[in-house]
Image: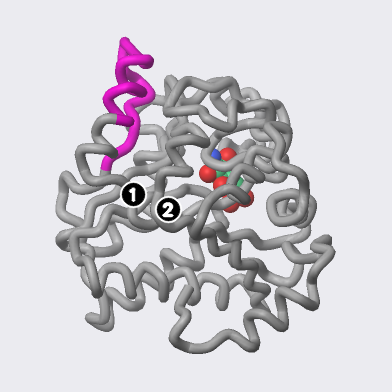
């Protein structure tokens, strides 16, 4: 796991965008794993700029989103389908049917979960998965106590997550759905490269556990310690509780150019 402490979230976004641009330059039809939330926005904003300057194209790329609320009307602003389109997909040049997400309104949700897993495999697997992290250490919507080997399934949202996300629902926690469909931790672990981005003091404990804590279902992101290629992009505040702060700074500063992310 490579931990990179950046001066601010904008720089973290620039480094995340670099990894995606490099991937698409060598593999234009790469499969991306997209995450919603405020954390990846700096990456998306930078990718939009690089698209506008002609440095990168998403025309042949495909993408799968991580998760979706269950039961939100399809025209609700906060379905993750609508959020990811607004925040990123519609701002670049993806082909119309290239971005997939689980259907949280389907009558048979377990079948949706199963088919989603199959669709990712059929596409050749995710080349690069973008992740944020919840204050309780969740990734996707894999809440504390999630099986470390879990696949795409229906989950109950933790109260803390619903409180955290109430800001997107007019501050009213009762408007936040109680259930979701999320890729499992096992699904996320199948991605070839994981780029996790975190900013702000609120993420500092989750980041410390992710990088330095024992692997535990109580901090689901810790499963990434078993992944062969993870890049963690932090701002100073999110790095506020790491034990090996100086080591991470020195490693990145001394890193040879040819090593990439
Ligand atoms: N399901 C999403 C996660 O994918 C996201 O990483 C996390 C953090 O969100 P934010 O980046 O807005 O802090 O919360 C949400 O619940």
Q: Are marks 1 and 2 in contact (CB under 8 Å)?
A: yes
Tell me if residue 91 comes above or below residue 34 in the rendering.
below
Image color mode? one colour
Residue drawn at the location 77% of the way across and 59% of the way down:
201
* Closer to us: 31 or 202: 31
Packing grade of label 1 (10 A; few <14, some 14-19, many >=20) is many
Mark 1 to mark 2: distance in Å? Answer: 7 Å
Residue drawn at the location 70% of the way across and 56% of the way down:
211
Quarter of the view holding residue 163:
top right
Q: Position of residue 103 (x, y in %)?
A: 32, 26
Q: Position of residue 20 (x, y in %)?
A: 36, 68
Residue drawn at the location 71% of the way across and 74% of the way down:
248
Is disc 2's CB within 8 Å of ligand 1?
Answer: no
Q: Position of residue 90 (x, y in %)?
A: 27, 56
- Highlighted range, magenta: 100-117
Quarter of the view holding residue 139:
top right
Is residue 223 found inside the magenta-colored segment of the image? no
Callout 2: SS: strand
Pointer 2 residue = 129
Callout 1: SS: loop
Pointer 1 residue = 126
């Amino acid at each position: 796991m490579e931990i990179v402490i950046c001066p601010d979230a904008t720089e973290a976004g620039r480094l995340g965008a670099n990894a995606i641009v490099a991937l698409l330059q060598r593999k234009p039809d790469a499969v991306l794993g997209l995450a919603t939330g405020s954390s990846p926005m700096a990456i998306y904003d930078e990718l939009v700029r690089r698209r506008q300057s002609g440095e990168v194209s998403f025309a042949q790329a495909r993408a799968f989103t991580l998760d979706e609320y269950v039961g939100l009307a399809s025209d609700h602003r906060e379905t993750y389908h609508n959020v990811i389109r607004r925040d990123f997909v519609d701002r670049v040049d993806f082909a119309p049917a290239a971005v997939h997400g689980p259907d949280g309104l389907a009558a048979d949700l377990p079948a949706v979960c199963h088919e989603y897993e199959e669709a990712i495999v059929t596409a050749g697997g995710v080349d690069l998965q973008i992740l944020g992290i919840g204050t309780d250490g969740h990734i996707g919507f894999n809440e504390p106590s999630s099986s470390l080997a879990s696949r795409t399934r229906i989950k109950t949202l933790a109260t803390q997550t619903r409180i955290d996300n109430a800001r997107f629902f007019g501050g009213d926690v009762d408007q936040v759905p109680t259930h979701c469909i999320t890729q499992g931790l096992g699904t996320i672990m199948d991605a070839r490269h994981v780029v996790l981005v975190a900013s702000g003091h609120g993420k500092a404990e989750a980041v410390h556990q992710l990088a330095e804590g024992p692997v535990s279902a109580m901090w689901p992101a810790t499963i990434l310690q078993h992944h062969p290629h993870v890049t963690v992009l932090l701002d100073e505040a999110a790095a506020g509780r790491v034990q090996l702060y100086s080591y991470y700074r020195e490693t990145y500063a001394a890193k040879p150019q040819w090593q990439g992310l």
